[in-house]
Image: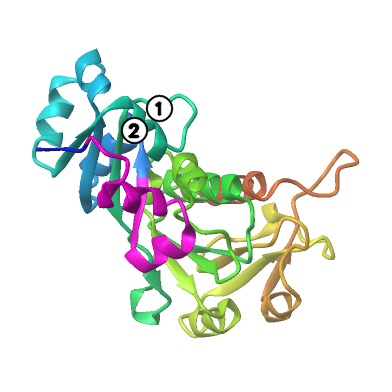
Amino acid sequence: MQKITSKENEFIKHVKKLKDKKYRDKSNEYVIEGIKLIKEALQEKAQINQIVICEDCEKSGILSDDLKYEIAKQECIYVPQNIFKTISEVSTPQGILAIVQKNNIKAELSEIDYNEDIIVALDDIQDPGNLGTILRTVDSVGLKQILVSKGTADSYNPKVVRSTMGAIFRVKIIECENLNETLKQIKKHKYEVLATSLQTNNSIYDIDYNKKVIVIGNEANGVSKEILDLADVKVKIPMLGKTESLNASVATGIMLYEYVRQKIKKI
């Protein structure tokens, strides 16, 4: 156990710098905060480098005995409340956070699991909340991986991490330098590329979700032209009202649960 009482401590400076994407990339670490995410990280055996605990949190009794037992196995650093507030990302912190090793990998075809029925690929999703919710949905349907384009929001942005509700520890994030080229290679493994587009009459309910790569496009511009040109199937979600399109994370959820419906029906 270590106690830090100075804001000028090098470790405290390090934690503050992890709010910046470039520094996260350089150190290959990110911050998780709150009891739920800490529990999830411990349960999923994420590589936790340090756990930082506010002294007031320790005294308040908010930590269960079971959690204290698990935390004690890690490198723990205790800080007073005034210091914890400077490193926290939330308005009402619970008083506990952890520095975790990132689990993302650069796109290598050998890293992709070709045994999954479907693969989700994100084409420049920009909103951290959307990205986090999509990761959570991917996890909820039992998928273990996701492809993200170079232009997609940082998967380890604090808002993304919170939105995943722990899914970030279970879904392998494969970062693609060139998503179009990665999709071309995946097609060689007998997958079809399925892209959402308003310029089609094909409904998402008319497609067999087997050996498909589902591409979710940018919130403003949709799927890029080069990927649309590569797509084997283009689909859209039927709309009964005047709205032309849905939020990217909502659309992803609808499509993935059509896949779930079809899978259950086959059992």
The single residue placed furthest to the top in the displayed view is: 60
Q: Is residue 135 left or right of residue 60?
A: right
Tell me the element at label 2. Answer: helix
Tag 1: amino acid: Pro
Residue toward you, 110 or 125? 125
At 32% from the left edge and 26% from the top edge, which residue is drawn?
A: 81
Image spot of residue 60 (x, y percent) = 25, 14
Tag 2: amino acid: Phe
Q: Is residue 52 left or right of residue 151?
A: left
Q: Quadrant of residue 164?
A: top left
The stretch in magenta equals 5-31
Q: Is residue 198 left or right of residue 82?
A: right
Residue 162 in sight: yes
Is residue 104 one of those drawn in magenta? no
Point out which mark residue 93 bears.
Answer: 1
Image spot of residue 92 (x, y percent) = 45, 24
Q: Residues within 10 Å of mark 2 (few under 14, many from 20)?
A: many
* Circles 2, 1 touching at the beta carbon (< 8 Å): yes
Q: Which residue is mark 2?
A: 84
Tell me the element at label 1. Answer: loop
